[in-house]
Image: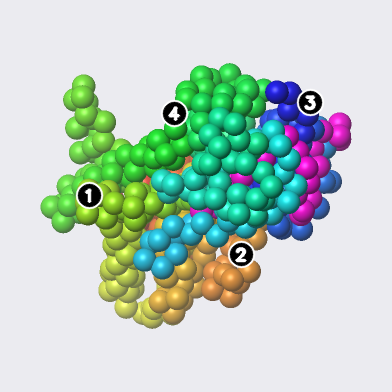
Amino acid sequence: MPFTTISVIGLGYIGLPTAAVFASRKKQVIGVDVNQNAVDIINRGQIHIVEPDLDMVVHAAVTEGYLRATTQPEPADAFLIAVPTPFKGDHEPDLSYIESASKSIASVLKKGDLVILESTSPVGATEQMAAWLAAARPDLSFPQTHGEDSDIRIAHCPERVLPGHVLRELVQNDRVIGGMTPKCSQLAISLYKIFVQGECIVTNARTAEMCKLTENSSRDVGIAFANELSMICDKLDINVWELISLANRHPRVNILQPGPGVGGHCIAVDPWFIVSKTPEQARLIRTAREVNDSKPQWVIEKVKLAVGEFLQSHPDKTSKEVTIACFGLAFKPDIDDLRESPALAITVEIADAHPGRVLAIEPNIEQLPEKLNGKLQLKTVEQGIAEADILVLLVDHSQFKTLSQETISSIKTIDTRGIWGSSKNQ
């Protein structure tokens, strides 16, 4: 079927680029978000997130009349739900955003519409979404009861893009399409083929959900091995960066790089979705999560030790006179996304415990989140180096990689990413 109007529910780091790419193909796109400020910014042809080239695509789409944003869903031919799926309590999946989005579009659904869940979700979430829709619209039929003859088609298609490269990867990457029926899958393929150049591979909804969780859990396990290795090497007085470089010269070994933990809205969250469904079976996945979740505290202890060593070598100073500069708050390099960021969590905990000044060096944001005002001082790279007694490298932003060794050689550093002379710290 031809898709005249496409609606994207959730205009964040995935939803807005997706909406913009559809609009760039001359499709009428309605973006829906509960954040009125984000809606207003988008309708001015601007963006409220950092993503290379997205500003130009959104500006063109809005100016040409193909994209507009609103806070209330409107009728469309296809609805893509791209809202957050965090966890709550003891790492239980929180589907409240999906539930709210589902119920919000239910009133505008009509026979023949397609609903796709893009949000990374625990296994069974697509079926749960279909149940919420069916309960809200008993006048329409859905795949779980009417199979191929349903009025509404439903599928799951997880995003699998890298922040900083979203526009390119949305177009070029393969997509896993998990329809609740074969017809649901085929209709979803016809929608994505409006812009996707990669292959669209068909499976069922549960396998599509598990595919995304598996991809991120595999990464999490690999990072956990590297992080555990870094702590072992620190205990044994071995340079972990050199060790990994040597081990990776083996033709069948590819150890990842350690860091201060794991963050973001995917890798730090998705493995728990598997654990929550199969707690007895997911032993390695759970352990990997626990290793990565413990790494920030290990870094904090290293900072405390560094403060103690600094005071020993500067007996004329007190803790209150020691300034710590934390380089990087985002969850990964060269983006402004602070969600589930171990760097941010580490910096905040240091600020809470340290009586002296704590500086935040994050070149990708212009101001700190309101809740951090008073706890941290946002400074430039140059100010951080000039004012701090201890430098803590938490994120390997491009701006930090270009600093010369001469610039920081006289300052005590804790380098969790191995870019500032890895022989000094691990």
Q: CA distance from mark 3 to mark 2?
A: 36 Å
Amino acid type of the residue tagged 3 in the rendering: Lys
- Dot in front, 1 or 3: 1
Q: Name the residue tied to disc 1.
A: 281
Q: CA distance from mark 4 to mark 3?
A: 29 Å
Amino acid type of the residue tagged 1 in the rendering: Gln
The residue shown at (62%, 41%) is 141
**Which element type, helix, strand or loop, lies under badge 2?**
loop
Amino acid type of the residue tagged 4 in the rendering: Thr
Q: Observer-nearest residue: 24 or 162?
A: 24
- Dot in front, 4 or 3: 4
Amino acid type of the residue tagged 2 in the rendering: Pro
Place residue 254 in its image quadrant.
top left
Magenta portion: prevailing SS class = loop
Q: CA distance from mark 1 to mark 3?
A: 47 Å
Q: Name the residue tied to disc 3.
A: 26
Check residue 369 in the rendering and tell me which mark sits there, or answer none: 2
Mark 4 / mark 3, whichever is N-terminal: 3
What segment is highlighted magenta in the picture?
63-85
* Callouts 4 and 1 close, C-beta under 8 Å: no
Mark 1 / mark 2, whichever is N-terminal: 1
* Callouts 1 and 3 close, C-beta under 8 Å: no
